[in-house]
Amino acid sequence: MIHKSRMTARMEGDFAVFLIGMRINKPLLIHKWLPVMAAMPRMLKELYTQPELGLLSHEMWFSRTLILVQYWRSLDSLLAYAKARNAEHLPAWQSFNQAIGTDGSVGIWHETYVAKPGSYENIYGNMPPFGLGKAGTLVEAKSGLQSASGRISRTLSP
């Protein structure tokens, strides 16, 4: 559903934004990058079938560099998943290190940010629920939420 009015997302409390991706440095070495690319759908399936792990939502883009933006209930949830011995992440990480390590064929990266109420803002116009708007609660951007400064200065909680 496309929201034709300007919308903004509200989140309750702190949350984590996790950017993660891979870069195909040697495109002809399909046997190197395809297993890395295939690991992420397994992790996402696990995370969506077990919402108690803390993933709220994600967006993904494909190109030479694959990028995922993930929204997590908390930094603690994200870190617990990364370390969980019974989850999909650790075997994928170990497999990457064994198959690729530092050979330069596939690059991987991530960045983590913790957002607190009043420290972020967002706007969506003529968009379906997307990004933080899919992870949180969308409200119409009115009554002091029309400008970026108005949205960021408000404590954003439902």
Image (tube, grey):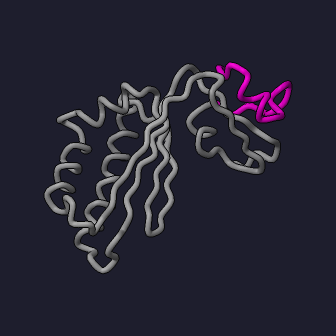
Q: Nearer the viewer, residue 1 or 20?
A: 20
Tell me if 1 is positioned left or right of 113 in this view.
right
User: In this picture, is 47 found above or below 115?
Assistant: below
Picture mark count: 0
Residue 18 at x, y percent in the picture: 45, 40
**Picture quarter containing residue 29?**
bottom left
**Which quarter of the image is occupied by the C terminus?**
top right
Q: Which residues are magenta?
A: 137-157
**Picture quarter containing residue 83?**
top left
What residue appears at the point 43 percent right and 60 percent down from the top-left corner? 66
User: In this picture, is 32 found above or below 19?
Assistant: below
Residue 50 at x, y percent in the picture: 35, 34
What residue appears at the point 43 percent right and 35 percent down from the top-left corner? 55
Q: Nearer the viewer, residue 94 or 38?
A: 94
What residue appears at the point 83 percent right and 34 percent down from the top-left corner? 146
User: In this picture, is 13 found above or below 125?
Assistant: above
